[in-house]
Image (spheres, rainbow, N blue to C red):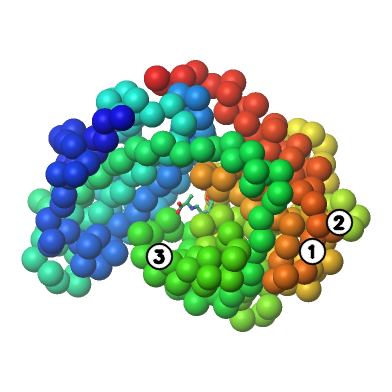
Amino acid sequence: MPRVAYVNGRFIPLSRAAVSVEDRGYQFADGVYEVIALKQGRFADEDGHLDRLGRSLGELSIAWPMPRPALCLVMRELVRRNRVRNGGLYMQVTRGVAPRDFKFPPPRVRPSLVMTVRPANLDPVERLANGVRVISLPDIRWSRRDIKSVALLPQVLGKQKAHEAGAFEGWMIDDDGLVTEGCSSNAWIITRDGVLVTRHATTAILNGITRQALLRIAGTLGLPFEERAFSLAEAYEAREAFLSSASTFCQPIVEIDGRPVGNGHPGLLAQRLRQSYVDGVMAGSPVI
Ligand code: PDD
């Protein structure tokens, strides 16, 4: 399988792909990113991810590295060159390369654009059949979590802690004891009364593109849902719990902090939502 990356206008073998040591992403985490799943040659929620990329860039006053239609062409060309049908595309835009200085560089400095594609199993049969465990962690991030920034150190530490505890994900808890989201996913519960709950989208969380799609699906299916914060105590008592992201779609959770969720098996509603989401992705046109 060839591994080809796109770096600032060129397709190059991944092993030789590099940016300058003075790239502001490297020195200041001054950049944003997106992860877009590829399922059987189809991008999942491409428009939503590109809309959010535009929003993140706008919030940080970083220009688009190229017009959006051109970006879409590069994405497709990279997928074709890598011959990946199932996996994910990673895209990162930083403020560019300039001598290290906190304030913005002059306008002639162009944003850096890097893209990679890699194969991944988006239908991990065993993980879906067994569900996953999560642990809770304090949310130690900054207050603009709505921006998909490449500054991910709190999430790196959280994921490692979860991994060491034998868990798949860490659920981050704010100062009020409320769940914000997972280290790289949004957090959901289904209450004993059958209400789907996920935190409302403010600067406290990343408004997941998969989250938005699942809310639309819930609306279409006529499932009752609430966008509001929920506490860890409420999550412990939930009938079901699951997480959502571009790389997992909708993944049932069977244990939180060592306590079984509901009957300890993947929830039926979570599985139904996942299926509807996948059906929606499969209705799109393949790019490869
Ligand atoms: N993470 N919340 C956080 C903090 C995330 O990092 C992510 C995605 C999500 C889910 O967003 P979406 O549904 O748009 O993927 C929520 C990606 C997958 C990552 O960093 O790899």
Tag 2: residue type? Asn
In the rendered image, the residue lying farthest to the right is 193
Residue on which the image places disc 1 = 260
Q: Mark 3 falls on what kind of element?
A: loop
Disc 2 CB within 8 Å of nearest ligand 1 atom: no
The residue at 16%/49% (across/down) is 18
Residue on which the image places disc 2 = 263
Q: Mark 2 falls on what kind of element?
A: loop
Q: How far apart in space, not on screen, are marks 1 and 3 (Cα)?
A: 29 Å
The residue at 18%/33% (across/down) is 11
Question: Along the polypeptide, which appears first: circle 2 or circle 3?
Answer: 3
Q: Where does the C terminus fall, quadrant-wise?
A: top left
Please, is residue 263 above or below residue 151 in the view? above
Name the residue nearer the viewer: 208 or 107: 208
Q: How far apart in space, not on screen, are marks 2 and 3 (Cα)?
A: 34 Å
Residue on which the image places disc 3 = 152
The residue at 58%/59% (across/down) is 168
Question: Along the polypeptide, which appears first: circle 1 or circle 3?
Answer: 3
The residue at 20%/48% (across/down) is 112
Disc 3 CB within 8 Å of nearest ligand 1 atom: yes
Neighbour tally class for label 1: few under 14, some 14-19, many 20 plus, Cα within 10 Å: some
| Residue 284: percent from left, percent from top | 54, 21
Tag 1: residue type? Pro
Tag 3: residue type? Leu
- Cβ–Cβ below 8 Å for labels 1 and 2? yes
Q: Quadrant of residue 219?
A: top right
